[in-house]
Amino acid sequence: MFEFEEPYQRDLALVGLGVLVVVLCVGGALAYLTLTSQSAKYLSVEETDTIYPHEEVVAFESMTPAQQRAFEAALADEDNRAEVTGVSTEVWTDHRAVSYRGELYEVGVLSVN
């Protein structure tokens, strides 16, 4: 199929092809692991007496129904955590606290691999 003028050219082409195969395999494996290794996310909720600036507090009523369910699940949990995989967590990463039924709760999103 390919003709080489010198014998070393064939060896060099085979080495180059081998390196290309290794690079493609390693790159493919890394891409696969990156795409398939989804980490679980948890909402952490803790009642607080800390006074936060208004812009760092979100009202419970302004969260989506799924976010409200996750927040209430975390409150009811013994460890004050609830899995929120599949729920938008932006509201909790953009704010430090949630006002709920006259109380203030610190919130945080934890990622667990």
Image (tube, rainbow, N blue to C red):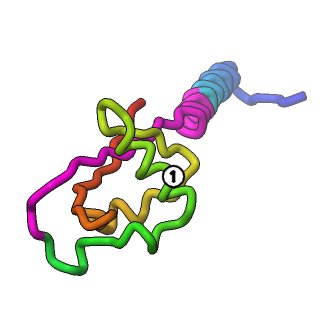
Residue 33, position as x, y percentages in the image: 55, 31
Q: Is residue 93 left or right of residue 27?
A: left
Quarter of the rendering occupied by the C terminus: top left
On the image, which quarter does residue 10 sit in?
Answer: top right
Vertical relation: 10 (above or below) 111? above
Of the pair 38 and 69, the residue shown nearer to us = 69
Q: Residue at x 9, y 62 (%)?
A: 50
- Residue 12 visible in the snapshot: no
Residue 22 drawn at (x, y percent): 59, 25
The answer to whether 47 appears left or right of 81 in the picture is left
User: Which residue type does callout 1 highlight?
Assistant: Arg
- Occupied quadrant, residue 31: top right
Instruction: Determine the residue positioned at 37% across, 35% down.
Output: 77
Does the magenta-highlighted stretch encompass residue 81? no
Q: Residue at x 31, y 39 (%)?
A: 80
Q: Looking at the picture, does residue 56 appear above or below residue 12? A: below
Q: Residue furthest left?
A: 50
Image quarter where the N terminus lies is top right
Which sits in the foreground, 36 or 18?
36
Magenta-colored span: 26-51
Q: Position of residue 71 (x, y in %)?
A: 41, 52
- Give the structural element (helix, strand or loop) at label 1: helix
